[in-house]
Amino acid sequence: MFAAAQILFENSGGARCLEWLLAELPRRISRPVSRTEWRGFTTVVPQIRVETRPVALTIQFDDDAAYVPAEIEETAAAVRGRIDSQALAALQRCRARLDIMSATPVEPVVTQDTISVVAETDLDPASPEVAAVLEALADITQGFVLDCVNGRLRPPASRTWVPLEPA
């Protein structure tokens, strides 16, 4: 699954994050919100589905210590010197993320010997309804919005996007 956007945050709520979001999100956005799950061959991942247009989105929680902090540190390194020191320190304290993905699955190409999945998405974080969901999630979690499609980061309580690549 390919995340079109992520919310990077400290997560003081622990493993009950999705339950908390299921209670909070409908109060902050005007789109229908429901519980769903992604099923792989041997894995079931709980998710939240939001009926944004033109593409519905899903939200899933990830705080795996084996890779999430390292990936967030890569993001911090990419914006070091382009966000203020307080925002950078807050980003470096983040240990969890919400992955925001299209609810339209990317179909794998299956041959006799291989299964191939192309990392693509039809979900644009800049579209108005998706942007409203991202803003609500960032507000709820006090987190950073990482727009993986458009290559930019927005610190908490800011309206200014920082490109991941220097200009």
Image (cartoon, helix red, strand yellow):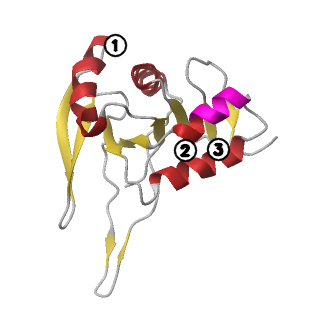
Residue at horizontal 18 percent and vertical 40 percent from the top? 36
- On the rendered structure, is 51 left or right of 3? left
The residue indicated by pointer 1 is: 28
Residue 104 screen position, x and y as percent: 31, 46
Secondary element type, mark 1: helix
Residue at horizontal 63 percent and vertical 42 percent from the top? 151
The residue indicated by pointer 3 is: 76
Residue at horizontal 58 percent and vertical 36 percent from the top? 91
Amino acid at pointer 3 = Ala
Residue 141 screen position, x and y as percent: 41, 25
Please tell me which residue lies in front, 152 or 158.
Answer: 158
Amino acid at pointer 2 = Cys
Q: In which quadrant of the rendered image does the N terminus lie? A: bottom left
The residue indicated by pointer 2 is: 148
Q: Looking at the image, is mark 3 or mark 1 earlier in the sequence? A: 1
Q: Check disc 1: other Cα within 10 Å, few if <14, some if 14-19, many if 20+.
A: some
Q: Main secondary structure of the magenta part?
A: helix
Q: Looking at the image, is mark 2 or mark 1 earlier in the sequence? A: 1
Image quadrant in which you'd find residue 148: top right
Report the magenta residues as a range: 85-90
Please tell me which residue lies in front, 145 or 68.
Answer: 68
Mark 3 vs mark 1: in front: 3
